[in-house]
Image (cartoon, helix red, strand yellow):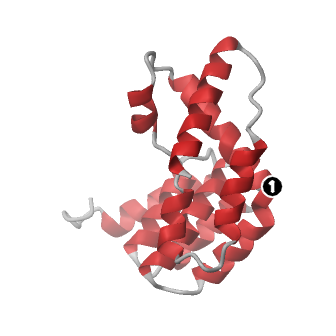
Amino acid sequence: VFKMTLGELRRLVSTQRTGQTLIVNPQIISALGTVLNDSKIDPQFKALMLQLPSNDILAQEEDVLDAVAFASARNALVSAFVEQHETAMRSLYNTHHKINRIGDRALKNILLRYLVEAEAEGSIQMAATQYKEAQNMTDTIAALSCLCETNSQEKQTALADFYAKWKDDAVVY
């Protein structure tokens, strides 16, 4: 899946540079959906399989570094994925949110990230709620990171709260 999504991101970056509309290959979205909906895959492994290549990886593949093209390509891919599979993503998020194991946290946090990135309805509130109710730093940072990618009041509230809680802890802050 990683190689397929990397290839698709590269194609989308190239398309963005030509000024054409970005249309994600439906086979890529279908492949991601197959992984998402396969209940036999371990949650942690599923989270790894659903992880898109980073800009660092993409940059190694490109001759010209174009942050706008990279962001547009990722946004198109994530938006198409969420558009096709939002119901399943929300269901899996809710299921794995209740379980406090490493793999379950990894899966729910990547799903939360995609929902927030795609600006899915209610996703900012989901991230804010996860931030407020988090019982571990993994969930706290994942939710805070999602909120930091928004221009929302929830972002400001969470940042102020995080600072107030941890400003005197040298390990965290």
The picture quadrant where one finds residue 11 is top right
Secondary structure at badge 1 equals helix
Residue 22 seen in the figure = yes
Question: Closer to the camera, 93 or 6?
Answer: 6
Please state which amino acid type lies under the numbered disc 1.
Answer: Gln
Residue sitting at the far left:
170
Left-right relation of 137 to 153: left
Left-right relation of 83 to 13: right
**How many numbered badges does the structure rendering display?**
1
The picture quadrant where one finds residue 73 is top right
- The x and y percentages for residue 157 are 54, 59
Residue sitting at the far top:
18
Query: Circle 1 is placed at which residue position?
Result: 84
Q: Residue at x 61, y 47 (%)?
A: 150
- The x and y percentages for residue 126 are 66, 67
Is 74 above or below relative to 163?
above
Is 146 above or below relative to 90?
above
- The x and y percentages for residue 146 are 55, 55
Question: Closer to the camera, 77 or 157?
Answer: 77
Left-right relation of 121 to 5: right
Q: Residue at x 41, y 70 (%)?
A: 138
Label 1: how many Cα within 10 Å (few below 14, some 14–19, many 20+) = some
Is 159 above or below relative to 20?
below
Q: Residue at x 74, y 39 (%)?
A: 25
Question: Closer to the camera, 121 or 94?
Answer: 94
Residue 158 seen in the figure = no
**Quadrant of the frame with the C terminus:** bottom left
Q: Residue at x 56, y 46 (%)?
A: 149
- The x and y percentages for residue 94 are 67, 78
